Amino acid sequence: MKLARNFYKPLAIGAPEPWREPPVRLERMIHFVPPHVDKLRSKIPELAGQVDVLLGNLEDAIPAEAKQAARRGFIEMAKSVEFGATGLWTRINALNSPWALDDVTEIVAAVGNKLDVIMLPKVEGPWDLYYLDQLLAQLEAKHRIEKPILIHAILETAEGVNKVEAIATASPRMHGMSLGPADLAASRAMKTTRVGGGHPDYKVLADVMPGAGERAKFQQDLWHYTLAKMVDACAAAAIKPFYGPFGDFSDPEACETQFRNAFLMGCVKRVFSPDPAEVAFAKRILEAMPDGTGAVMIEGKMQDDATWKQAKILIDLARMVAAKDAEPAARYGL
């Protein structure tokens, strides 16, 4: 086990010191781009000012014969576009693939100073993070990268979920984690082909009531346990929990419900911004308790230091949203 005093030491001579407090950035949604498709890549300069995170996807959905083209396309995209406050990420191929090593070495060499986060798929344990952490430090030192590149892990296997706490604390590079429901379902031999969301056969029955007719049935959330376990691990490690994809594009209501549930549980990734009414109430809490101490009553409910912290998180998020989008800025009154 690494001693606490050594946790934040660079793993290579000349590498930048790891962040003790990673930069606060707006990351409501990650916009995935297949970098080998010229038509889509040409839209990046326009998109860069409209989204929170642009991610060049090198892994799933990229055919094997297009892997190298995708890598070259991402490097070209990163070099040619100024991203400003928009985060630049890439999802590399899994560490056991033939492409992962070249993904990391070529991208860091070419655009390491512009890259914010590497998303690592199919993380099974802290050992995956130890390897990538050391490799990145060596490459940062070699290519004189000025800031540390963070790592975002995807939970896509039963073993990864089982090791989630160790993964969360494996490296000071840890940015956060996302749930990968499709691969996780396969790893667990779950009887579903859906990408995220519920399943009509996963349900509970209401109690039998004499004379009440047919018993009511209620669909349950397949992912609640895993998501809650991931959120707890991330919160304890002070990193960010994200949900993941929702595959049924024909059902936007179910998609929003899934993301809203994840957001309420503590996840970052979502397709909406904080509710204006909640922001307004949070403002009242902060105004009533400027220094965050004591207790006050607002609308018959007691507010104390714990709710002040919740309100502060909400207001800070709303301010970042307002700085990016004019419409919510007007609704928040910030």
Image: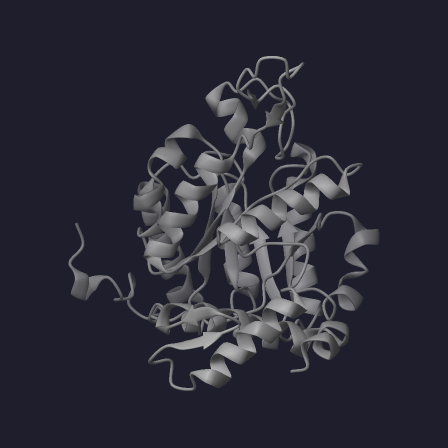
In the image, residue 226 sits, relative to residue 137, either above or below, namely above
Does any portion of residue 58 appear in the rendered image?
no
Does any portion of residue 262 appear in the rendered image?
yes
Query: Residue 268 placed where, x, y %?
Result: 54, 57
Q: Residue at x 18, y 54 (%)?
A: 2
In the image, residue 252 sits, relative to residue 113, either above or below, namely above
Q: Residue at x 80, y 67 (%)?
A: 46
Of 25 and 34, nearer the camera is 25
Q: On the picture, is 163 further left or further right than 259?
A: left
Scheme of colours in the image: one colour
Quarter of the rendering containing residue 77? bottom right
Query: Residue 25 placed where, x, y %?
Result: 54, 70
Q: How many marks?
A: 0
Query: Residue 7 placed where, x, y %?
Result: 24, 61
Of 219 and 33, nearer the camera is 219
Quarter of the rendering containing residue 280? bottom right
Query: Residue 203 placed where, x, y %?
Result: 57, 23
